[in-house]
Image (tube, grey):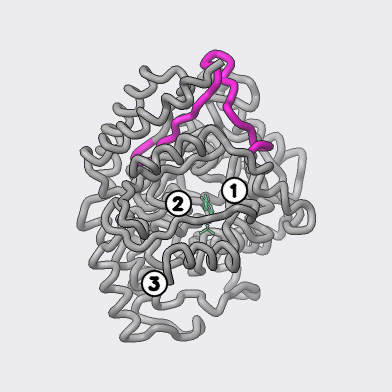
Amino acid sequence: MTSEQIIEITSKHTYGTWRYQKGWKPLHIVDAEGCYFTDASGKKYLDFSAQLMCSNLGHKNKAVIKAIADQAEKLSFIAPGFTTDVRAELSKLLLEFLPKGLEKFYFSTSGTEANEAAIKIARMYTGKHKIISRYNSYHGSTAASIAATGDPRRWAVEPSGKIDGVIFAPECNCYRCPLGHNYPDCNIACADYIEHMIKNEGNVAAVMIEPVVGTNGVLVPPKEYLPKLRKICDDNNVLLIADEVMSGWGRTGQWFAVDNWGIKPDILTTAKGITSAYVPLGLTATSMKIADFFDDHYFAHGHTYEAHPLTLAPAIAAIKEFKRLDLIKQAAEKGIYLKEKLEELRTRHPSIGDVRGIGLFWAVEIVKNEESKLPFNTKEDKIKGSQLMVDKVTSEMMKHGVYMQGWISHFVIAPPLIISEDQIDLAIEVLDSALTIVDSELS
Ligand SMILES: Cc1ncc(COP(=O)(O)O)c(C=O)c1O
């Protein structure tokens, strides 16, 4: 088949995600190695967002590929009622690297499913119904996880495509405080607001958060926020669920984002970087206290592909690679370099309203006016399918061989953790030049 035929069949017979289907003509990708991927014409792109913030080890990691091949030869599949070498080995590794106190694991095949399980477990364990999530968040696409999603991807499925019982709190966003406060004078009022909700709603099972919000802006909370929220949950007998689907596995310069503040969630979910996206694996990890409840209460959950050996073997290899290559430390160190470069960009472009992040996880937010912080586009624009300013910039960057994710009015910069300083320089140079498009449209 020619590349044109491949694109034609793909757009006609397969769904493109989160978009109107009309006019979808995906780029045909044929190869990927390290921090680069290659299209059918042979053009190479430097990956400045690790695809969907998931290819943490980069592409063609030999150890992960070997683990998949070896496991396929040995035992490709066995029903989840049995155990396997890899199930036990991965469990041991998780005990070593997950935040302490998370000791029982449910393996699925996506971040969405990991959150679906977390919500069900929280409700069954507490016997309570309501889940508090926050507006600027994404937790997945099936009924429970989209219900817990605060961003506008939820709007289109309301009310029939989602579960009930999820209520939304204001996010922690010091650049655009939803409560109109300024840090540190605010005394972390956004956390107090959650306590107010818990006390006045009643029947709250859990608070579900991305410790560092991902797609919705790489929102890094101030140091007081998560410890305060942990205490609020404890004081009110509510579980804390940390969604580390995007923020886990070295992304923030620690194994998990909660490690930056020494927080221990009751339930942690993750996916993406756990295998560095070589195969789909989701993980829901709980404390033993929660796990013990299910010793004599029916655990009403499961999938055919739960603990699928072909997903577990590469996770073991990926975690060992993170360790061997010292990538967690490197993410923290290269993050400092990236931060400097982004701060420099900010001085050159009046359209940059904010630069924020941690480790190799950064957002550059563009605004029409620095003082009023007026964004270029809104959530409504996104859902209407309008062409966004961030899309213009990312398309321009693709022309110059750099791939980067944009969302509503900011960019999400989250390269593979193996990226070099030279590659960071190259991507920044292309971003620098593409941002002139935005500067020229300033009011
Ligand atoms: C924080 C967060 N949670 C959950 C998900 C859903 O994960 P998946 O796409 O693997 O279902 C995502 C995906 O981007 C995410 O970023």
Question: Is the Cβ of the residue at disc 1 closer than 8 Å to that at disc 2?
Answer: no
Provide the residue designation for mark 2. 52
Q: Nearer the viewer, residue 97 or 114?
A: 114
Q: Nearer the viewer, residue 126 or 435?
A: 435
Residue at the (70%, 34%) spot, across then down: 196
* Disc 1 crowd, CA 10 A, few/some/many (<14, 14-19, 20+): many
SS for dot 3 = helix
Tell me the magenta residue range.
358-381
Q: Which comes sooner in the sequence, label 1 or label 3?
A: 1
Q: Which comes sooner in the sequence, label 1 or label 2?
A: 2
Provide the residue designation for mark 3. 312
Q: Let me know if residue 362 is in the magenta part.
A: yes
Q: Is mark 1 within 8 Å of ligand 1?
A: no
Q: Is residue 321 left or right of residue 138?
A: left
Gap between marks 2 and 3, in whole Å? 21 Å
Residue at the (33%, 34%) spot, across then down: 430
The amino acid pointed to by label 2 is: Leu
Question: Is the Cβ of the residue at disc 1 closer than 8 Å to that at disc 3?
Answer: no
Q: Let me know if residue 204 is in the magenta part.
A: no
Please name which of the two marks, 2 or 3, marks the residue nearer to the observer: 2
* Disc 3 crowd, CA 10 A, few/some/many (<14, 14-19, 20+): many
Q: Is residue 218 above or below residue 325?
A: above
Please name which of the two marks, 1 or 2, marks the residue nearer to the observer: 2
Provide the residue designation for mark 1. 208
The percent position of residue 182, horizontal first and vertical second, equals 55, 18
The amino acid pointed to by label 3 is: Leu
The amino acid pointed to by label 1 is: Met
SS for dot 1 = strand
Gap between marks 1 and 3, in whole Å? 26 Å
The percent position of residue 195, horizontal first and vertical second, equals 66, 36
The percent position of residue 63, horizontal first and vertical second, equals 24, 67
Q: Is mark 2 within 8 Å of ligand 1?
A: yes
